[in-house]
Amino acid sequence: MATAHDPSFYRSPADAAKAPPEKLAYVAMPNVEAPPQPDRLAVVDVDPDSPTYAQIVGQLEMPNAGDELHRFGWNACSACLCPGHDHHMERRYLIVPGIRSSRIHVIDTQPDPKTPQLHKVIEPQEVHEKTGYSRPHTVHCGPDGIYISALGAPDGEGPGGILLMDAHNFELGGAWEAERGDQYFAYDFWWHLMKDVMVTSEWATPNMIENGVEPQLLLGGKYGHCMHIWNLEERRHLETLDLGKEHQMVLELRPAHHPDKLYGFVGVVLSLNDLSASVWLWHRDNGKWKVQKVIEIPAEAAKPDDLPPLLKGFKAVPPLITDINLSTDDRFLYVSCWGTGELRQYDVTDPYHPKPTGFVRLGGIVRRSPLPSVEGPLNGGPQMVEVSRDGRRVYFTNSLYAAWDEQFYPDGVKGWMVKLDVPPKGGMSLDPNFFLEFDPRYRGHQVRLQGGDSSSDSYCYSK
C-alpha cells in the first residue's frame, strides 16, 4: 500500500486537468460467439509517440463464459482525498462486473499495467446472497468504499439498487439503501459528495431488457422515466423527479465535477411522442429540486426498407442517446446518438442553455457514415464515450448491449474504437491515426483511462 497519496488522485477538477496525458486505455470486450466464450479486458496503447499506438498491447481473458463485461471502474480515486477518509489508497484495481452473469472480477493492473492479472472473482451466488441484487452495472469509487449499481433482483425482477464493496479486501457489504421510498428501477448513479446528495436513474428490470427491447412495454411507457434524489449519508430516498412516461429510459447521469455546483445532466434515450432523444438538467432552485429539458435531438426520416424490423413502422431513425459525458472542467458535454451515428459536443458553461460546438458522424442504423481513413461504411455508432482529464481527447466505442445490438443492427455490430482531438476552445476532429477494429469475436464497450478520466473521479475541493 502506498505511504503517500496516489499521484493520480487530485484535490480538485482543475488539478486533474493539469495531469499528464494517459498512455493506456482499458476496454471491456464482451465475446459474441455462439456458444459464448470468455470475455476479455483489452489494454490499448493511446500514446501517439508509441510504435504500437492505437493497438491492443495486452489482454486478460476472464475465467468463465457468458459474463458480458459492460461497465467497470477503479477501486480508488480522488474521492479518497475527501476530509476524514483514507488518503493512502492506491488506484490499482479495476472492478469489472459481468452484467449478464452477475459475476464480479477484481483485476490488478500492477506491477505491469499492460499485463493485468485476475486478483479475485466474486461469484453470482455470493452477490445474490449478500446484497439481494443481480446484474451489476455502474462502478464508482467513493471516499469510503466501492459502490456498484445493480439492475434488479436475482430472479430478474426488481427492485434494483446499489451494493457496497470494501475497497481494501473487496468483500461485499450488502445493499446501500436504508430507506428506498418509491424507487424500483435502477441504472446509473452518482453524487454531489460535498452536498450529501446521491442521484440515481432508471432503465428497467433485467427481465425487461435481456432479450432486447420489448415493443409492447416501450409503447406502453413501461420503462424507466424518473430520477431519484437521496440523502447520501443517511442512505435515504428524498424525492422522485418524473420526466413523464413519454420519456423512456432515463440513463446516464453526469453531475458537475466542481464540488460547489449542484446540478448535472441526464440523457433520455427516446420520446414516444416523436422518437426524439433529449438531455435534461437537474438543479436545486430555491430549496427545491427541479429537472428541465435543455437539449432535444430529433429523429431522422428514413425509408422502411432501410430500417430494422423494430423501426420499420416508424419510418424514422431515432437518435437513441445511449451515453453522455462531461469534461472535467464542466465546460463541454458529449452526447452519443447511437441510432443516427452522431457524437455531439455542447458548450454547457451556461448549463441552462447548451450551445452546439462540435459534431462527428460515424456509423448509424441507416447512413452508415464511413471513417475517411477506413474503406467502407461503419456500423454501430458512437456509444460509450470517455473524455481525458484535460478534456483534449475523447474516445468512443460502438456496441451497446448484445441483445440490443442485434435488434438495431441486424447484420451485426463489428466492434471498433476511435479517438477525437479537442482544441481548447471546443470543436473536435477525428484522429486519422487512431482506428482500432476489434477481433470479430468481440465488441468494445466501456473505456477507462490509465490514471483516471472524466467519469471516474469525484472531488471534494474547489482548488
Image (cartoon, helix red, strand yellow):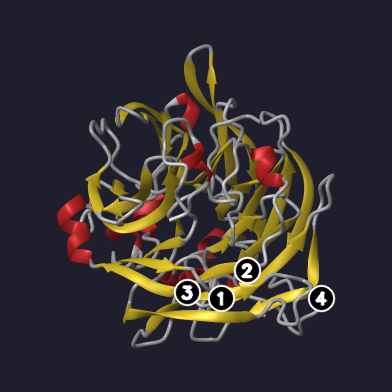
The answer to whether residue 309 of the structure is visible from this angle is no
Residue denoted by label 1: 114
Residue denoted by label 4: 372
Q: Are marks 3 and 4 in contact (CB under 8 Å)?
A: no
Q: Residues within 10 Å of mark 1 (few under 14, many from 20)?
A: many
Please tell me whether mark 1 sits on a helix, a strand or a loop. Answer: loop
Which of marks 2 and 3 precedes in the sequence?
2
The answer to whether residue 218 of the structure is visible from this angle is yes
What residue type is disc 1 on?
Lys
Residue toward you, 41 or 403: 41
Q: How far apart in space, not on screen, are marks 3 and 2 (Cα)?
A: 12 Å
Is 275 positioned to the left or the right of 135 in the image?
right
Residue denoted by label 2: 24
Q: Residue at x 73, y 43 (%)?
A: 346
What residue type is disc 2 on?
Leu
Residue toward you, 131 or 7: 7
Q: Residues within 10 Å of mark 3 (few under 14, many from 20)?
A: many
Where is residue 373, by image quadrant?
A: bottom right
Q: How far apart in space, not on screen, are marks 4 and 1 (Cα)?
A: 30 Å
Residue denoted by label 3: 116
Which of marks 2 and 1 precedes in the sequence?
2
Q: Residue at x 42, y 36 (%)?
A: 85
Which of marks 4 and 2 precedes in the sequence?
2
What residue type is disc 4 on?
Pro
Q: Are marks 3 and 1 in contact (CB under 8 Å)?
A: yes
